[in-house]
Image: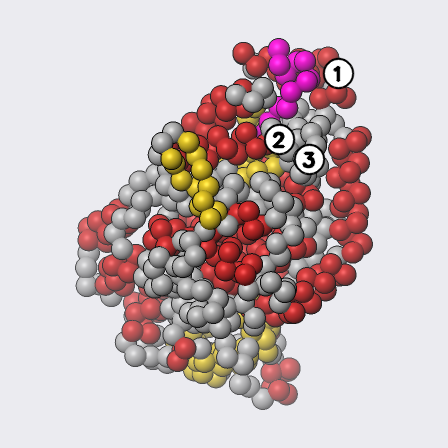
Amino acid sequence: MTLNATLAKVTDRIIERSKDSRRRYLDLIDRQRDEGVHRPTLSCGNLAHGFAASGDDKSTIRSGKAMNIGIVTAYNDMLSAHQPYGRYPEQIKIFARERGATAQVAGGVPAMCDGVTQGQDSMELSLFSRDVIAMGTAVGLSHGMFEGALLLGICDKIVPGLLIGTLRFGHLPTILVPAGPMPSGLANKEKIRVRQLYAEGKVGEKELMDAESASYHGAGTCTFYGTANSNQMMMEMMGLHMPGSSFVNPGNKLRQELTRAAVHRMTEIGWDGEDYRALGHCIDEKAIVNAVVGLLATGGSTNHVIHLPAIARAAGIILDWDDMDELSDVVPLIASVYPNGAGDINYFHAAGGMPYVIRELLGAGLAHDDIRTVYGKSLAEGAQEPMMEGEDLVWKPAAEESRDDTLLKPVSAPFRKDGGLALLEGNMGRATMKVSAVAPERHTIEAPARVFTTQHQVAEAFKAGELDRDVVVILRFQGPAANGMPELHMLTSPLGVIQDRGYNVALVTDGRMSGASGKVPSAIHVSPEAFHGGPLAKVRDGDMVRVCATTGKLEALVDAGEWDARELAAPPPPEWGSGRELFAMLRHHSDPAEKGGSAMLAEAGL
């Protein structure tokens, strides 16, 4: 199939824009392989420390003749998605020995659960935890003991952080190993219904807790299509998972065999073999474009409008929101997974899942087939479904037709002809809107502004009945420099209630919404942020504001002369507590959202 012209044009533009930085990056990883820290360069004392506690693997590591795989794990047993990883290191060591290799845990990184911290002060640590994870990953891999890396991580900032850190060791072959979603519990639609009833005071805390517990009920990733599951989708679109492995539930034979397959494959792509596949060569401009395409085609998380530019920068690639917006014009929405649709990620997987999505996009010329995947010669080899035949893991071609067209449709008959994200611009700045879950009649909202500086103020105004009208809620000083850019998911229920009461409502913020942002039109990541003098700081209560995904406009309908003459609102003082003061340095040095909202990358000159 001929490559879509817009896809080709955007890719070529990214390649040209990134020419110098990408060359510097590739030169770096080539030098790291040849001249960097690795086992043959370690002194006897260094090496002895490195294998001192390796038990039965000691002699093999000491000999230096077999691959030693570094495991970076984000395991904790508070985060349901990562709880299954507790036993993975021991399993991986066994699977490595089956191929004459060894494995060690190179390091552990924090894994923050945004579901636990939503609406809490600690959510202000969330985005910058990605930088902490990247630095922790670099610390683990810096020992030079490893010829390959397996990354154990699933959720939100964790996968981007693991990738950013490992890309600075991009000479290492790297495979990401998923653990899978929890089985489906209470339907997400019913959970949201109870949340809205609670917000209105119509049910009590017991009923709310019963609903939440029935939804989040066991080990595995949350089943809605938020940032965690969007992460897994992107890894498949970039060819960094074993084919079709993202959404197999924990605790079954197939899940274990996919982990075994990843370990065995790692032993085949090391730098001493004939099939060397360095992470820095696998993640190139075409792979990054594939990740964007997957995000658009499946209605994925808005958080990746921030994460993808950051991941790309770590590989010397410059991606911006204009690239994403132009791709959104030609990439159709072919998946409808909650909150965009009724079914959750398990139903999506059963309908054909990522193998079907990959096959459809490649068949329409909407993805690059010629990328260097961890498993084969092209992305097309990822369009396969894993399954067990007796005791054997086998892969079979992706379904020719969707098994449930309420969840998956072909490119020829999509849910929407364009992607799930829109770029908005105007006198208030640049912003992102997730449109895949917003009803078409709500793509344009024009209403008076009500200005807030904390999400708790919004919640209080809702409870007082002050928002029962057509309103554009302006929530500012929520960007990376102001307070770490917390997710504002707690606003979903009250704003949804206002909308359900028949009012026109929208949210405009320089903060983030959850990757599971739903039916309320929300212009988020407004850049430049108010803290850095962005025009969001000029908006006043009562200003008429237009938020329009159809025309791509984000405007305060204020006379231009008056607008230019207005003074900027002063930011509130920084808050202390819950460790927020420890992240002051990251806030002070952070990039704008469009560049990834990172302090670490900015200071590194990337």
Q: Which mark is residue 43?
A: 1
Q: For marks 2 and 3, give the CA distance.
A: 8 Å
Query: What residue is drawn where x is 47% and y is 23%?
Result: 90
| Mark 1 secondary-structure assignment | loop
| Mark 3 secondary-structure assignment | loop
Q: Is residue 349 visible?
A: yes
Q: Quadrant of residue 135?
A: top right
Name the amino acid, label 2. Glu
**Residue toward you, 244 or 247:** 244
Q: Which mark is residue 268?
A: 2
Spot occupied by residue 152 in the image (x, y as percentages of width and height): 51, 36
Query: What residue is drawn where x is 54% and y is 81%?
Result: 551
- Of the numbered discs 2 and 3, the one sitting upstream in the chain is 2
Spot occupied by residue 343 in the image (x, y as percentages of width and height): 33, 58
Q: For marks 3 and 1, give the CA distance.
A: 26 Å
Spot occupied by residue 587 in the image (x, y as percentages of width and height): 60, 52
Question: Relative to 99, is 254 above or below?
Answer: below
Considering the image in quadrants, where does the N terminus appear? bottom right
- Of the numbered discs 2 and 1, the one sitting upstream in the chain is 1
In the image: residue 237, left or right of residue 77: right
Part of the protein shown in magenta = 59-71
Question: Relative to 459, is 28 above or below?
Answer: above
CA neighbours of label 1 inside 10 A, class few (<14), some (14 to 19), many (20+): few
Name the amino acid, label 1. Ser
Q: Quadrant of residue 387?
A: top left
Name the amino acid, label 3. Tyr
Q: Please name the residue that numbered disc 3 is placed on.
A: 276
- Of the numbered discs 3 and 1, the one sitting upstream in the chain is 1
